[in-house]
Amino acid sequence: MILGIETSCDETAAALVTREGEIRSSVVSSQADLHARYGGVVPEVASRRHLELVTPVIRDALDRAGAGLDDVDTVAVTAGPGLIGALLVGVSAAKALAWARRVPLVPVDHLHGHVASLFLQPTLLEPPFICLLASGGHTLLLDVRDRDRAGMRVLGTTLDDAAGEAFDKGARLLGLPYPGGAALDALARAGDPAAYAFPVARVPGLDFSFSGLKTALLYAVRGLDPAQLVERRADLAASYQRAIVRALVERLEAAGSGTVAIVGGVAANSELRASLPDAVAAPLPLCTDNAAMIASAARYTPAAPDYLSLDAYASTA
Ligand code: KG4
Ligand code: ZN
């Protein structure tokens, strides 16, 4: 089995996955509560928490799979992109395990990991397909030709905020706690999506832009007194969500015909899923950050030849 480790942001995660893409266990320990009072992830706080959690989370993943380290033939770890200090905790833990057990270590790109959430059972999606990867840090439209990292070509990306960031910033303006995507999704269900006409930015090609939308929400909120805001909050959430979803769906449709798939935290959004009934969506627990997707990507990634000198990277480019 492949042991996957993911510590790129504020989730400490470990999973055991077979070569066939069967998830034997997947443990995700979220630090969201720890960061909520700061309104966002504090990198140094995240690193320290990963350090405390990484060993118990790996142990828990082994226990839940009814496995021991003897059953692990490969260690896979997110090498980037992400918070550098947070990534280094996972990379160091992976090196120590690989070295102690004399097994190969596979460095995985986090974005490849999100796409590889579609290669797990029961989804087992076959390329080619067009993939929308929408998370807190990225919004990418990908042409996926193959299961390896080189098989993904970027068709479009965001020029400013990521879609998840737009959800989180909107949620914050509406007084919802961080990270607000899921809370905004829930609040929107009680609102009228046609109440406010928020703009969907039209940028050339297949790129995205969400910063204008956030500003439009800010002005709408400023125009209300506290009592009115309470009354209109659900309508604001529903209209705002509709604008983000519309931007994502329009771009996906413009990318061409054929199989369409959605991955990443924003792929958990109920309106996005409902707006794309024919799209292949990663199962909900595999949308947000997890280690099963990292172990999955490792099935299509070569092991590091000299892994003790492997370094983490904060950004691709
Ligand atoms: O993929 P992910 O866990 O982490 C990154 O790699 O960034 O994505 C987290 C993002 C956050 O911005 C969060 O607010 C958003 O996904 N998110 C949602 C929903 N669930 C999580 N956004 C909209 N609707 C949801 N139901
Ligand atoms: Zn992610």
Image: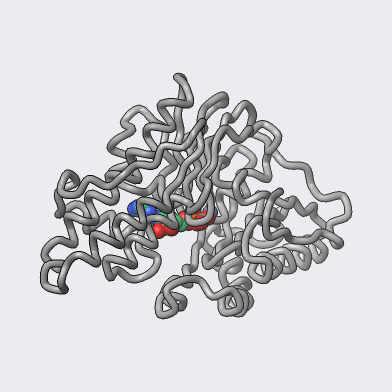
Q: Vertically, is 132 above or below 100?
A: above
Give the color scheme: rainbow, by chain, secondary structure or one colour. one colour
Q: Is residue 243 above or below residue 90?
A: above
Q: Is residue 194 left or right of residue 119?
A: left
Total numbered labels placed on residues in the image: 0
33 relative to 308, above or below: below
209 horizontally vs 90: left or right: left
x 44%, y 52%: residue: 265
Percent x, y for residue 154? 60, 35
> Residue visible at 82% across and 50% down?
304
Horizontal side, residue 183 vs residue 49: left or right:
left
Give the residue displayed 51% in from the left and 51% down from the top. Answer: 160
Rendered location of residue 58, percent (x, y): 60, 66
Asked if residue 63 can be seen in this view, the reply is yes
Q: Which residue is nearer to you in this view: 282 or 4?
A: 282
At which x and y percent is residue 64? 51, 61
In this view, the residue in front, 18 or 313, is 313
Q: Quadrant of residue 233?
A: bottom left
Q: Position of residue 47 (x, y in %)?
A: 62, 75
Q: Residue at x 17, y 67 (%)?
A: 224
Q: Which corner quadrant of the figure contains ligand 1?
A: bottom left
> Looking at the image, can residue 25 be seen?
no
Query: Residue 302 lies in what quarter of the image?
Result: top right
